[in-house]
Every structure is written in C-alpha cells, then in structure tokens.
Image (tube, rainbow, N blue to C red):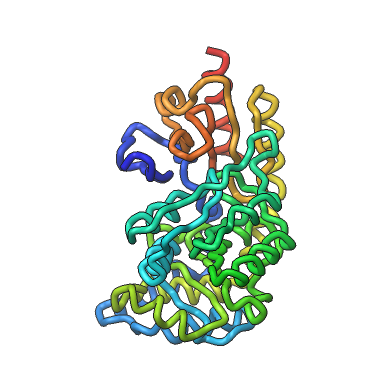
Amino acid sequence: MQRYDHGGDIYTYDQAVLDFSANANPLGYPPGLKESLLENLNSFQRYPDSSYRELRQALADRHGIKPEQVVCGNGATDLIYRICAYFRPQRALVTAPTFSEYERAVVLYGGRVSEHLLGEADSFDLDESVLEAVTEDTTLVFLCSPNNPTGRLIPLDLLREMTRRCRQIGAYVVLDECFLDFTGGESLIGFLAEEPNLLILRAFTKMYAMAGLRLGYLLASDPDLLKTIAAFGPTWSVSGPAQVAGLAALRASDWPAKTRAFFDEERPFMYRELQALGLKVFEGRANYLLFKSDRPLFAPLLEKGILVRNCGNYTGLSDLFIRIGIQTRENNLKLLAALQEVLDG
C-alpha cells in the first residue's frame, strides 16, 4: 500500500548515510534514560506490569489528571487503531495533507474518510471552514497540531470550536499532539474536564528519541471510555523497556525546554538557508520543515547518501514536496551542501 509509506525506512535504502526522512529528536535520549534501561536489564526477563501503573501515575502527575484518564500503547499509532476498532466510524473527517495512519485505521475497520483539503496558498493552515465539513454522519474528527508534514499549529480557539461542534452531533475529536512539545504551543489537556468528546494522543517517540521502543499514550476525561478503548489492544502492549524508558524520560523534566531551545536556533537557520537555495519553504513550528522544489529531489539526494521524506503520497502534495527532520548543525550543513549540488546540477 504505497500511500501509507513513512519516513525512517533506512532498511530499504542501504546507500543512505544520513536520514532526514524521520523526525525524532536529534539530541537523542535525555540524560538518565540509557542508564535506566541498563540498570533494569535483568527485570526484562519477566512480564511487564500489564497495567503499567507506575507509568500511568507519572503521566497523570505530569499532566495534572487522574491515572485512570491515561491509556498507554505501543506507540501512538497503536492507539489510533484501537480508537477506530472501538468506534467503527461510519465516517471520519481528516485534513489533507496529514498523517496517513488516521485514514488507514478508519478504512481497516470499515469506515470511510472525508478529506478537508488545506491550501498551499494559505501555508496549509486550517481555518473555520473545517467546521462545515462536520456533518451529522461524522463519528470521528482527526486533527494534528502541529500538523504532519506541514508543522503548522491549529489555533486553540478553532480546536475548541471543533470540540463544541462535534459535541452537538455526538462525534469525537481525536487530537494528535505528538509534536506539540517542540513548539511551545498550548495543549488542550487542561480542557479535558470540559471536553467529554475529546481524545488526546501523545507519544515519547519524537521528543525522547524512542521510536524503536514504541510508547504512546491517550488521554480523555472519561475513564470508562478509555478502559473500553484499551481493551482493543493486546495484553502487555507496553513492554518492560518502554515502561522503564518512559519513566526515565519523565524524570528528565527539563528535556522539552532544552530541546525547544535547540530548535529555536536550528529551525530558523534551516528555514533561511533552504529559502536561499530558491526553495519554497513552509514556516512550520515543529522539528521538521516542508519545502517545495521545481523538480523532484528525492532520488538525486539519495544518490548522495541522504534520505529525505518524499511527500508524493500525501493527499494535496506531490513529489515536488520534501519534508526534512531538522538535525544537528553539522548534519544540516551536509544536507544543504548536497541540495546545492543537486540544484546547481
């Protein structure tokens, strides 16, 4: 299913040396995480806590909610599929372009997807017109803020309007905040008590560079709803290493702020340098940037040992669009040099 390809596929492209197609934190693990994994190595011989109680409590403490308002899974994608397994949505609304697993999960469970197209001329920003796309047969609305692959934030007022609109017709909003901590934008977690039809997705994947460990979580105001959604996943879906790593990551409470400080320098640098190469760059707020060229760049960059995310399989984009995960200055300079060679060639 070519449409659902993702970044980070270094296994197909053996010649790639630098992977800009994925968007995990280039600073790597926060302090203490690797040490915690090694210290707990022997404990991984036994089954993990299937209810991940310590981790749920730590997440509840972090977000100022109750442990029963937290469900963890094998990454955020696991939880997207559980949500769709529970709701079996007749119709779901997604924006386009956006993360493709929303659509894939809806279709897998027999639903159909309506796409609300975002305009390139408007930097792919979401506006109030999306509210009109929510109809009486809508079961779920998937929103991503900042959106992937554009990096654009959805205004808080618009998100609140969407939850009100969905509440009127009995629909639910699934808000993906997996990249929000890179932006400093305001979360809707503080509004959970007021929004019974809101489900919030978060993950350790990006901020804590834990893509291979697989740990995501889902928040809602209704513990019974979460318990039912959780039941659509297997027992022990959160491994022992993932639980240990998650707890260690949460103890590194200053890591998101340190990471944002890094990207507050590196993102504007890359934005300016890509523009200087004559590329059309969309000013995202996350740890990645979307840009457009007048010719495809994926293959020529791959020949130079650099893997980028070809966005040709996103609705509303083409293979002229490339997403790059922002890396260290040293690696970013290598990408810029390769791009210069390709564009000059």
**Near-viewer residue (220 or 271):** 220
Q: Position of residue 324 (x, y in %)?
A: 54, 39
Residue drawn at the location 33% of the way across and 61% of the way down: 109
Horizontal placement of 122 versus 47: left or right?
right
Residue drawn at the location 54% of the way across and 60% of the way down: 141
The count of marks equals: 0
Residue 258 appears anywhere in the view: yes
Rendered view: 345 above or below 29: above
Horizontal placement of 345 versus 146: left or right?
left
Location of residue 337 by image quarter? top right
Residue drawn at the location 66% of the way across and 37% of the way down: 282
Q: Position of residue 19 (x, y in %)?
A: 45, 40
**Near-viewer residue (325 or 320):** 320
Residue 328 appears anywhere in the view: no
Q: Position of residue 26 (x, y in %)?
A: 54, 50
Rendered view: 313 above or below 98: above
Location of residue 256 by image quarter? bottom right
**Near-viewer residue (30 or 295):** 295
Rendered view: 219 above or below 114: below
Residue drawn at the location 63% of the way across and 57% of the way down: 182
Residue that extends furthest to the right in the rendered view of this protein: 157
Q: Position of residue 34 (x, y in %)?
A: 44, 67
Residue that extends furthest to the left in the rendered view of this protein: 45
Residue that extends furthest to the top in the rendered view of this protein: 345
Q: Which quadrant: the N terminus?
A: top left
